[in-house]
Image (cartoon, rainbow, N blue to C red):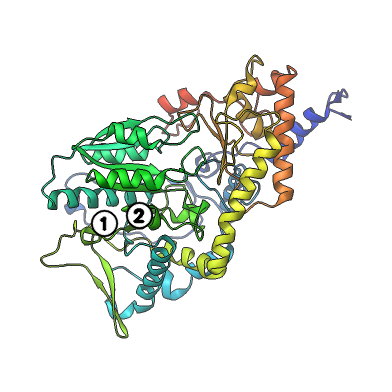
């Protein structure tokens, strides 16, 4: 117990809140700190001929506020301290794999020969970069046991688009353009039906069974001559391996359709199971999830797509061709079935470097161990929490992530959202909530292979404490949360519908 400024004692929780507020004060906008009449740098006056602007030239000064270097640095450092990040704590978002990015990868990506190249340089000046991409492509094909790959897609959803475009091109080439239906399990990532719809397909939903997986019988029942493909995630978004995946692939192929596998969760099986052996025709690989490149924030991504022999002829350009000591980037192919160019340049080089660095650091045995550790950590969290939390699909082994539901909160007055907000007070980013949609009040947790037993024990201890507190009726801890964050409970619906997009100076 300690004393507050009024001389009255404060509880430990109140004191923690006071300390948090002292360490994380409100941070004003740069516009509120700087001054319009000063600048941190001296810039020469520039005379510009505005004739080419077509009457859209600026009519008033660019209202940029000047700050000193210390003011600028402190502002961004303080902002960084307001965020929860993987560098500060476990980041248990399910199906997103927020894992540690080794600093070695970052160092390799900053080497001059990689960081300073330009996509329009002559091919003979970027042989090292092309060889790096070729090596990564070779690794990805070997890890998936597939004969072809496209490295140009810039993200997972872009990779889905590439794979489905290849499937569409294959059907068109075979004279089966009338196939206009794509099967998508209920538990799929939202990008799957969105990608199919974007390409003009109708989406036919496949329900999950009582075990959270897809039955062959459900796929066969949904099949007809108009089905073009199935888009299935394996391991699926419930964190479960699809046990009938080979039978599903056989049923799809027997009907003349193709099997698109969402490879978002490849990190759970890499080095252990080759998707090509399971009968897939196309699969994107999220490099940020599997091989530790930066994730999120709207920055550059990469989603290479591996292709089966049936779809290889339809791969987009550009692609790398190695002949003797020279490597060329093939950008135009005459008399080809290629679906054409998917994007302006060849993928995201920085992401490729980071991924190859991760793979070479681990080797094939290390890659296998990464997958095993990811699965071990998820099952460890499951076993630690299952006494207080509820499992929607029974007590079965999970893969890289563990799925709970909110039935353990029934009658407590605490919602899934309340529980997630209380996690912020404990220093943790909330788990994924309300997804996958096949589970009411879903709570999806993915610890990744990055976490040690110590960090998992600490996380589980706090989660158990929260669950027990909810059940004994300490509702205020949840409905008022977060109380230790720089901002308390925010009306997120209002923020999404009526965002404040412009700073206006208060009079």
- Position of 482 with respect to 38 (left or right) is right
Residue sitting at 55 percent across and 61 percent down?
368
Residue sitting at 53 percent across and 48 percent down?
97
- Position of 264 with respect to 417 (left or right) is left
Where 20 falls versus 64 (above or below)? above
Residue 59: % across, % down: 28, 42
Decide if residue 89 is in sight here: yes
Residue sitting at 68 percent across and 39 percent down?
383
Q: Residues within 10 Å of mark 2 (few under 14, many from 20)?
A: many
According to the picture, the residue beneath numbered tag 1 turns out to be 343
Residue 115: % across, % down: 43, 69
Q: CA distance from mark 1 to mark 2?
A: 8 Å
According to the picture, the residue beneath numbered tag 2 turns out to be 154
Q: Residue furthest bottom?
A: 325
Residue 278: % across, % down: 39, 53
Q: Secondary structure at mark 1?
A: loop
Q: Nearer the viewer, residue 324 or 146?
A: 146
């Amino acid at each position: 117990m300690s004393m507050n400024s009024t001389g009255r004692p404060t509880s430990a929780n109140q004191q923690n809140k006071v300390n948090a507020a002292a360490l994380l004060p409100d941070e004003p906008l740069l516009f509120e700190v700087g001054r319009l009449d000063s600048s941190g740098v001296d810039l020469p006056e520039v005379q510009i001929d505005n004739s080419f602007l077509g009457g859209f030239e600026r009519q008033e000064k660019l209202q940029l506020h000047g700050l000193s270097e210390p003011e600028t640095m402190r502002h961004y450092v303080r902002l960084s301290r307001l965020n929860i990040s993987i560098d500060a704590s476990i980041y248990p978002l399910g199906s997103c794999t927020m894992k540690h990015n080794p600093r070695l990868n970052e160092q390799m990506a900053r080497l001059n020969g990689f960081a300073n190249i330009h996509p329009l340089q002559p091919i003979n000046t970027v042989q090292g970069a092309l060889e790096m991409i070729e090596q990564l492509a070779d690794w990805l094909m070997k890890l998936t046991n597939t004969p072809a790959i496209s490295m140009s897609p810039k993200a997972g959803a872009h990779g889905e688009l590439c794979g489905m475009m290849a499937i569409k091109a294959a059907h068109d080439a075979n004279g089966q353009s009338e196939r206009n239906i794509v099967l998508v399990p209920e538990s799929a990532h939202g990008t799957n039906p969105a990608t199919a719809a974007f390409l003009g397909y109708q989406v036919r939903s496949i329900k999950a069974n009582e075990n959270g997986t897809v039955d062959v019988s459900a796929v066969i029942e949904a099949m007809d001559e108009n089905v073009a493909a199935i888009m299935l995630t394996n391991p699926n978004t419930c964190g479960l391996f699809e046990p009938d995946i080979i039978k599903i692939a056989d049923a799809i192929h027997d009907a003349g359709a193709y099997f698109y596998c969402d490879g978002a969760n490849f990190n759970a099986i890499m080095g252990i199971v080759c998707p090509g052996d399971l009968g897939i025709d196309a699969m994107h690989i999220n490099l940020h999830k599997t091989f530790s490149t930066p994730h999120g924030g709207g920055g550059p991504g990469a989603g290479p797509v591996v292709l089966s022999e049936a779809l290889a002829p339809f791969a987009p350009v550009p692609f790398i061709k190695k002949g003797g000591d020279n490597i060329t980037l093939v950008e135009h192919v005459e008399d080809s079935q290629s679906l054409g160019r998917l994007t302006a340049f060849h993928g995201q080089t920085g992401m490729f470097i980071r991924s190859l660095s991760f793979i070479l650091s681990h080797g094939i045995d290390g890659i296998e161990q990464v997958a095993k550790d990811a699965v071990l950590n998820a099952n460890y969290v499951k076993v630690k929490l299952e006494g207080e939390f509820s499992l929607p699909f029974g007590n079965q082994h999970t893969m890289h992530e563990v799925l709970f539901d909110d039935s353990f909160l029934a009658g407590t007055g605490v919602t899934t959202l309340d529980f997630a907000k209380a996690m912020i007070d404990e220093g943790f980013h909330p788990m994924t909530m309300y997804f996958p949609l096949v589970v009411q009040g879903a709570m999806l947790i993915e610890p990744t292979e990055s976490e040690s037993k110590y960090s998992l024990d600490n996380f589980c201890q706090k989660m158990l404490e929260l669950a027990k507190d909810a059940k004994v009726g300490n509702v205020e801890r949840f409905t008022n949360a977060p109380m230790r964050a720089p901002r308390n409970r925010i009306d997120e619906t209002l923020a999404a519908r009526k965002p404040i997009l412009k700073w206006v100076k208060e009079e």
